[in-house]
Image (cartoon, helix red, strand yellow):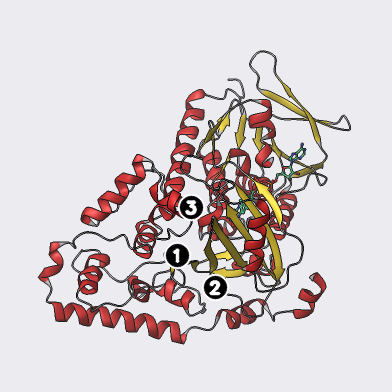
Amino acid sequence: MSDNRIKSIVIVGGGTAGWMAAASLRRHFHKLPIDITLVESAEIGTIGVGEATIPTIRRFYQALGLTDLDVLKATQGTCKLGIQFRDWNAPGSSFIHPFGLYGQELRGVGFHHYWLKMRQAGKAADIGQYCLGASLAAGNRFTTPSQNPPSTLSIFDWALHFDAGLFAQLMRKTAEADGVTRVEGNIAKVHQRAEDGFIESVELSDGRIVEGELFIDCSGFRGLLIEQTLKTGYEDWSQWLFCDRALAVQSVGTPDPPSYTDVLALSSGWRWRIPLRHRFGNGYVYSSRFIDDDAAKAELVATIPDRLLFEPRPIRFTPGRRKKTWNKNCVSLGLASGFLEPLESTSIALIETGIEKIKQLFPDRRFDPRVIDEFNDWSQREFERVRDFIILHYKAAQRADTPFWRHCRDAEIPDTLAHKIESFRSRGHFIRYRWEMFQPASWLAIYAGFGIMPEDYDPAVDVLDADGLARSLEEMRRNVQAAVESAPTHQDFLERFCGPYLPDAVKEMA
Ligand code: FAD
């Protein structure tokens, strides 16, 4: 029997995607005779943004043997309980999309039905008050979730904000310690097999050749292998997502960072503010159809209360995805595979799931087209689900004071999303497709935050008498409130867990 096993993997690019893939695949194939080489160019550098995550990142680094403390300390990280959306409905409006559940089911009926009935009767508080994750974030508190939650009311999860450069360094250290070979250099040529176009090697500008059997393209937006070499094609989603530019800038930090990402609606897009221990990451994601770069810069700078560490840096992008994430013997990850704006911090999560898919569908040297098709099908669905979730925010936002927001309100949306929204509106149902990254609680957070609610609640709710229901809801609200009050502030938690805030380090950086 001939040995068709892959013996060499070449990863092109040493940003977050490249080093995450290197660390994770090396650990997965521990001790197996598979060489993993990563080629990166210090001269080209990395995108240097990508600092807010979702909770799956913790499972990712834990599988590499890293603890929360390791990562928080190594990356100047802070804890993230969710995202605060401000001014998306009207000036001064705000709600939190938490990583947590709302209330408790009663008699097998979803909490939102009970809440809706009592809300209509004027007897229920804001839905966030029945969610521990959202309430902790609103109070700028933080504690780790109970391992043994006494009820669904105590269930929440958390993620991290981290310095993207430091996180890539941590991944590099882990990967190199496990045996990944790093090659520094600028790839000038890509060599393909004459008969079928499969990639054989990459050639550096100094003439060195790096050969491989499986190539993973983590070269960023340029897609050096997947696009520039293999001409795979890109599915452009600009008809649904209108933002195509970003300005990114860092500013001095605070000893008291929030335990959430702040996302503020601006005239032609939105501004992120990501708290780290040593600084903030800020940026404006906007549509060049509705605002020019200078006006966007002025608008961004006006929203940042602290001193900037450098001039805002422009980034251009096209929302969409590579037509095939995997083409021939090349799999793309990270920005090389496509881009969805970071409104829900999904890009790094898509890198994680991309790596998982590579492991699950790991090919041999015959590169069975069925395996490749399966991979591409999974990737496409997953990207589309995230795309729909992001579009929901723009479609549902009640803001209509600028041409950009009116355009978003009036725009067509994909049928898959329209079906979801209508199902929720008519009967309070959550439609779940395969490869959904966001669970019903997240959809509920966004629906409720933007005022999309079922036309009527589930009739089974009326089985419970209204007074009993009001008492149950009030008890849930009080339990959440008590848990919030007993939790430390986020600042206290970080100081206890990671050590004191170091203003000198901040001064040095500034
Ligand atoms: P890059 O960081 O661009 O790395 C590309 C690598 O390829 C570099 O090492 C480069 O040197 C190398 N390379 C390229 N060409 C060559 C060559 N010819 N020879 C040798 N090496 C080469 N994601 C989130 O999850 N959360 C967020 O909050 C978030 N915010 C974002 C904000 C913005 C404005 C943008 C644009 C993206 C954001 N992302 C976010 C996405 C996130 O930044 C990326 O998914 C992540 O950084 C991975 O990037 P990458 O590794 O694919 O590419």
Residue drawn at (62%, 56%), measured in percent from left and top? 64
Task: Point out residue 387 in the picture as x, y percentages from the top left corner.
Answer: 46, 46
Classed neighbour count for the residue bearing mark 3: other residues with Cα under 10 Å, few (<14), some (14–19), many (≥20): some
Instruction: Tell me the SS state at disc 2.
Output: loop
Could you tell me if residue 433 is visible in this image?
no
- Do tag 2 and tag 3 residues touch (Cβ < 8 Å)? no
Residue 479, above or below 366: below
Q: Please provide percent x and percent y for residue 468.
A: 16, 80
* Residue at figure coordinates x 47%, y 25% from the top left: 370
Placement of the N terminus among the 4 image quadrants: top right
Residue type highlighted by circle 3? Pro
Number of other residues with Cα within 10 Å of mark 2, as a class: few under 14, some 14 to 19, many 20 or more:
many
- Check the picture and name the quadrant holding the C terminus: bottom right
Q: Which residue is mark 1?
A: 99
Q: CA distance from mark 1 to mark 2?
A: 12 Å
Q: Is residue 466 left or right of residue 311?
A: left
Mark 3 in CB contact with mark 1 (< 8 angstroms): no
Category of crowding for the residue at label 1, using alpha-carbon neighbours closer than 10 angstroms: few (below 14), some (14–19), many (at least 20):
many
Q: Position of residue 214 (x, y in %)?
A: 65, 31
Q: Secondary structure at mark 3?
A: helix
Residue 259: give its label.
2
Amino acid carrying label 2: it is Ser
- Determine whether 186 is above or below 340 in the image: above
> Which mark identifies residue 127?
none
> What residue is shown with label 3?
403
Closest to the observer, 176 or 375: 375
Task: Describe the element under mark 1 as helix, strand or loop.
Answer: loop
Q: Nearer the viewer, mark 2 or mark 3?
A: 3
Q: Quadrant of residue 164?
A: bottom right
Of pointers 3 and 1, the one earlier in the residue sequence: 1
